[in-house]
Amino acid sequence: MIKINKLEIENVKRVKAVKIEPTANGLTLLGGKNKQGKTSVLDAIAWALGGNKYRPSQAARDGSVIPPYLHLTLSNGLVVERKGKNSDLKVVDPNGQKGGQMLLDSFVEELAINLPKFMGSTNKEKANILLQIIGVGQQLHELEAKEQEVYNRRHAIGQIADQKAKFAKEQTYFPDAPKEPVSASELIQQQQSILARNGENQRKRQHVAAIQAAFSHQGQEVERLEQQWKEAKLKYNQLKNDLEIANKDAIDLQDESTEELQANIRQIDEINRKVRANLDKDKAETDASEYRQQYDALSTEINGIRQQKTDLLNTAPLPLPGLSVDDGELIYNGQRWDNMSGSDQLKVSTAIVRKLKPDCGFILLDKLEQMDLETLQEFGQWLEQEGLQAIATRVSTGEECSIIIEDGYVSGQEGVTLQPPPGEIDPGPTWTATPAANTWKAGEF
């Protein structure tokens, strides 16, 4: 990984003359009070490596007649320089060949010199950057789109199932009602059939009465007509036999009542209303059960898609253990971005930026005064462990600071001029950031 070995800055924004050798691994912390030039150092580095799009709007220091001067030596041997009236860029490689901004862009990650751009992006934008650099962005996008589509279908099915279940629950059930609607014509036919049978019974009764009358009349005829006694007696006896037979037939006759059918006919609308209510309730319960089965099947499908997403991320080359993406947002050790500590946010950002361009071994950080000393130390140790270099600023003059910037100079070296006269080489005094017992001190190189 390429890092910054040395940097010299003069007359840039608030910087008068600063010459620093950052520590190769870990945190080089530029401390000092407000408006002393700390951020100007970072802006100058970004300008030197990132090109004129990072040139400060007022690059030259107020009151200076000498133009800005930037000189960086990188760990791969490249020397990056901006100087002169137009601050022209000059890049020289270890073999003495010249390069330019395209050479720097090949290994300098934009977000490494402009980390606020990444940290200020939305959670989904951060997650998209990570997914693209690990090569699973498109696959995960397709899985998430499929999951959303199935989720929407399941949601619709669930709503219908709930509506059907609610409708079924609200319906009154009539256990005494028949299973099918009653037909009025069938009841009328039954009534007519009974009336016909009753009519036949009445005809038989009338027949009995007629025979009885004939028998009486014939008896009178016997009494009145002695001369016709034999003939009358014969007929009388015959009628007597007929009467016995008719009586036997009539003894067991019993009329059927049509009252129930008449009541049913009168109540047919009410009966059918109950039948239809029962049928509606049964169908709603059946529909609710079927939709619930569909809902459960879609839930299983969603869980399968989510498992595919998990498997995809588990096998992807993530830049940091514990880092993942869930529902389009970064997750680190189970926490979303807004729940991460400041140290974890910097770890995640730094790891992702490093993954974008693995050859870029440094990162610029501004305003670390928001971190307490314990968090600052924890972040510095992580940088050392990862072999990364960070140059950062903090409003502080405490021992945690590697170097103190005062009034545009490294504290203790006020008045130093970095640009040697033409034809002379004079590196002059410098400050080396050397971590020891979690503090830094000035030195010579």
Image: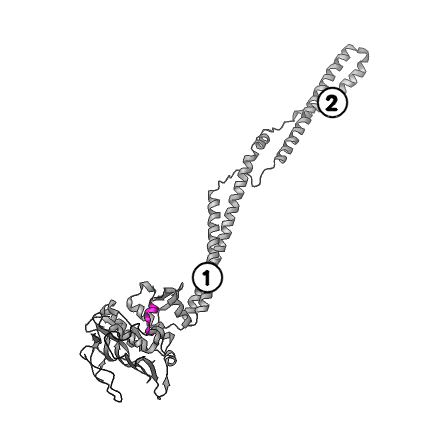
Looking at the image, residue 339 lies above or below residue 430:
above
CA neighbours of label 2 inside 10 A, class few (<14), some (14 to 19), many (20+): some
Mark nearest the camera among 2 and 1 is: 1
Q: Is residue 200 left or right of residue 75?
A: right
Q: Is residue 268 left or right of residue 402?
A: right
Which three-letter amino acid code belongs to the residue tagged 2? Asp
Which three-letter amino acid code belongs to the residue tagged 1? Glu
Looking at the image, residue 229 lies above or below residue 443:
above
Q: Main secondary structure of the magenta part?
A: helix
- Tell me the element at label 1: helix
Measure how far apart labels 2 and 1 are at the Cα level.
93 Å
Residue 257 lies within the magenta run: no
Residue 9, x across and y down, in percent: 26, 79
- Of residues 58 and 135, the one drawn nearer to the viewer in this rendering: 58
Residue 78, x across and y down, in percent: 33, 84
Can you tell which mark lies on residue 147? Answer: 1
Residue 4's image quarter? bottom left
- Of residues 39 and 82, the one drawn nearer to the viewer in this rendering: 82
Query: At 54% across and 35% down in the image, what residue appears?
Result: 270
Magenta stretch, residue numbers: 112-121
Quadrant containing the N terminus in the rendered view? bottom left
- Of residues 40 and 208, the one drawn nearer to the viewer in this rendering: 40
Residue 115 lies within the magenta run: yes
Residue 239, x across and y down, in percent: 75, 20
Residue 416, x across and y down, in percent: 20, 81
Quadrant containing the C terminus in the rendered view? bottom left
Labels 2 and 1: the sequence-earlier one: 1
Which residue is tagged 2? 242
